[in-house]
Amino acid sequence: MVLAAGLVGPSIPWVELIPILSLLGGACFLLLVGSLVPNWPRRGYAWVTGVSAVVAIVANAIKWNNLYYNKGALFLADAISIDRFSVLASIAICLALVMSALLVSAYLLRMNADGPELYALLLTAGIGALVMVSANDLIVLFLGLETLSLSLYLLAASNRDREESQESGLKYFILGGFSSAFFLYGVALIFGSTGSTKISGISEALSGNISVLRTDALLLVGIGMLLVGLGFKVSAAPFHIWTPDVYEGAPTPVTAFMASVGKVAAFAALMRVLMVGLEQRADDWRPVVWALALLTVFVGSILAVVQTNVKRMLAYSSISHAGFILVGVEAAGHMSGDGIASSMNYLAIYTVLVMGSFAIVLAMSGNSDGETNLSDFKGLAKRRPALALAFTVLLFAQAGVPLTAGFVAKFAVIKSAVEVDSYVLAVAAMVAAVIGAYLYLRIAVSMWLEEPVSENEISVDPAVVVVIALAVVATLVVGLFPELLLQATRLARFAPR
């Protein structure tokens, strides 16, 4: 009792935590009221999830406006950083959460099932993601990482009628455990060498130390382990091996969710750790990021070409996209140019593209959620021309065709690499983009020029139509007016230390 009386906790900025509290309240409401009131109106769970995410978006938008004259600050004993970087990433996460709720509602209606469990897991995963993008402490970052990961493991294995779903959840769980172990070992070693787990504290410790001979092996090994742990989460080669199997086996809305929210959270955390905590050791970690980016863009692009399942194609495509984002991260490691802005710009655009693409895959996947082979998309233009046109726009955007958002994303990261004289990476990214374009053209040719092999009616749920329409409109608007997003990402900066 004496010890407890002497403890003084940090002040809690409840207003700053409204986005997280909104998602937490939605999850608790779904689980509690869902168990007490079994007969909910159809899409009722989706509405609660969507409203919770929209409240978080509004709260983040207000914070973004309030940070116009303020670069941000640290809260909760300096464990949480509220700045425009975390706010922008949080808005992207919550937008993806709204779209995912719509896709899950359509998926469950098709399966003749409904319940609060999947929606509650979406919200808890969103909470973990929001914690990750704003964490200023490696322990807090790990808590957010595990909250997100555990929710994704369960979501991936949520379809108990498909063996592929169970297998994907198990694979993700086992390999994710290994990556978490690497991350924790890295945290321990960095703490041992700097005496702090706070990202800003690590930066201060490294600023006061000058290691001329670079004999601090403890720190270097810790940095390497952190890169392994976060590299797994962003699907960077060679830590990508889980991605194709998990993306293919998981329910399609879950695949869209993990491809968008998972990547935004992991990349935002990676950039904060590298650019804030390890800024003084950029010469040590930048060559590793350089090698990861080079390997990832080619592994994703080349292996995507030989796939025959559209979900696996998009999985390898997501690996290639992770490589492009790493190009921007490497450019940011030079501490000049627009590396951070271009990476955030790519993340925001990719989130929209991947949600729209997997929404179309969901529309095509049938009642079993398994009709995702390339042959199932043959002749789609003759069966549902509007669906084929929308998918073509999204595929061309991912290929980087001009006047689409994808071109803006790819051009920005390549430009940032050129600005810091990373010419090899810039050329490699352009070559990988050409290789990847074959993949997207292959799907488009199959839809427009080949005869359909199935006459089954394609039923598209209104919720799926909304997601596809939002994705296509956003892709074209950003492609035609790129400054709308580029200006926002240029303002995304970290809080002062």
Image (spheres, rainbow, N blue to C red):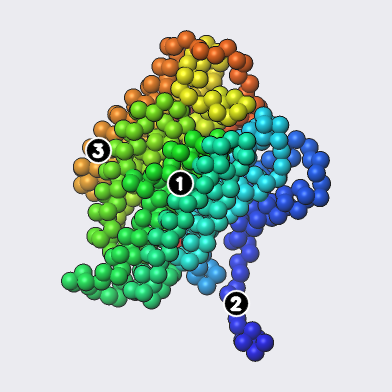
Q: Where residue 152 sits: x, y (%)?
A: 55, 48
Q: How far apart are marks 3 and 2 (CA)?
A: 51 Å
Residue under the image location 80 percent in, 44 percent down:
38
Residue 434: image location, x then y, percent: 29, 29
Q: Please report the residue visible at 29 percent of the width from the left and 37 percent of the height from the top.
A: 298
Q: Mark 1 points at which residue?
A: 263
Q: Which element is circle 1 on? A: helix
Nearer-N-terminus badge (2/1): 2
* Disc 3: which residue: 428
Instruction: Place residue 270 in its image quadrant.
Output: bottom left
**Going 43% across and 11% down the picture, which residue do you hit?**
449
- Give how far apart the Cα atoms at labels 2 and 1 are: 33 Å
In the visual, does 483 lie left or right of 152? left
Q: Is residue 128 above or below residue 385?
A: below
Tell me where residue 241 sits by quadrant.
top left
Relative depth, front residue between 491 and 444: 444
Could you tell me how many numbered marks the image carries? Answer: 3
Quadrant including the C terminus: bottom left
Residue ID for mark 2: 9
Give the image location of residue 209, x and y in percent: 27, 75
Dot 3 or dot 1: first in sequence order is: 1
Neighbourhood count class around disc 3 (C-alpha, 10 Å): few under 14, some 14–19, many 20 upward: some
